[in-house]
Each structure stands twice: as structure tokens, then as C-alpha cells.
Image (tube, rainbow, N blue to C red):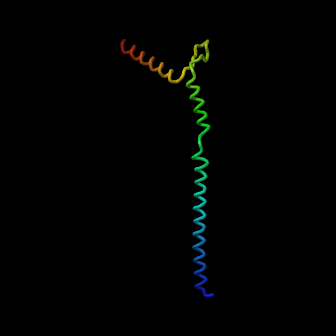
């Protein structure tokens, strides 16, 4: 066999090998990223949603005594904020009159 033909076949084989390796590496990275997307990023946060739902239900419970002897009452958050703002408005108005 002529040396030129052997060198040509060797060069073509080397180029094809590099192309196949690069293609395999790109396919691996694509599969890896798609698995990360599917398992981590796109995963629903059901635990967080459950915790948030529990917290909101506690915040919006009807008024009730937590400790009747100490006079501690638990109010829905909206009601508590409204009462707080009303008291702050009265305190600010009373201080301005003095």
C-alpha cells in the first residue's frame, strides 16, 4: 500500500473520531442539562406550598384566646393590621394635639 493512502485514511479516521467524540460529549451535556431541568428546576415545590398553606390558615383563623388569663388573643392578620393602624393613627393624632 502506498504511504499517501495510509496517511489519508489515518487522517480521515482521526477527524471522524474527533467529530464522534465531540458529538457524544454534546449529547451527554444536553441529556445532563435536561435531567437537571426536569428533576430540579421544574420540580413543583409541594412542600413549600403545603407550609405556606398551613401558615396562611393559622394567620387567618377566627379570633380566639391563646391564654385567657393573660388576655392574649390570636386575631386574623388582616384584622390585627387594621387594629394596629387604627391605634397608630389615634396615637399620632393625639400627639399632634398636645
| In the image, residue 33 above or below residue 78 | below
Q: Is residue 66 left or right of residue 85?
A: right
The residue positioned farthest toward the left in the image shown: 97
* Residue 70 percent location from the top left of the image: 60, 13
The residue positioned farthest toward the bottom in the image shown: 2
Q: Observer-nearest residue: 76 or 8?
A: 76
| In the image, residue 71 above or below residue 31 | above
Image quadrant occupied by the N terminus: bottom right
* Residue 85 percent location from the top left of the image: 45, 20
The residue drawn where x is 61% and y is 48% is 39
The residue positioned farthest toward the right in the image shown: 1
The residue drawn where x is 57% and y is 46% is 42
| In the image, residue 65 above or below residue 38 | above
Indicate the quadrant where residue 10 lies: bottom right
* Residue 62 percent location from the top left of the image: 57, 20
Image quadrant occupied by the C terminus: top left
The residue drawn where x is 59% and y is 37% is 48
* Residue 26 percent location from the top left of the image: 57, 61
| In the image, residue 16 above or below residue 92 | below
Q: Observer-nearest residue: 96 or 15?
A: 15
The residue drawn where x is 59% and y is 74% is 14
Indicate the quadrant where residue 5 lies: bottom right
Count the numbered circles shown: 0
Q: Observer-nearest residue: 83 or 69?
A: 83
Q: Is residue 73 left or right of residue 91?
A: right
Amino acid at each position: 500500500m502506498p504511504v499517501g493512502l495510509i496517511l489519508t485514511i489515518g487522517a480521515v479516521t482521526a477527524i471522524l473520531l474527533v467529530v464522534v467524540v465531540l458529538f457524544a460529549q454534546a449529547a451527554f451535556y444536553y441529556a445532563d442539562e435536561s435531567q437537571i431541568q426536569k428533576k430540579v428546576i421544574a420540580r413543583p415545590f409541594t412542600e413549600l406550598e403545603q407550609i405556606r398553606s398551613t401558615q396562611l390558615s393559622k394567620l387567618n383563623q377566627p379570633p380566639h384566646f391563646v391564654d385567657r388569663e393573660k388576655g392574649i388573643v390570636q386575631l386574623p392578620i388582616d384584622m390585627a393590621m387594621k387594629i394596629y393602624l387604627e391605634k397608630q393613627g389615634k396615637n399620632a393624632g393625639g400627639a399632634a394635639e398636645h
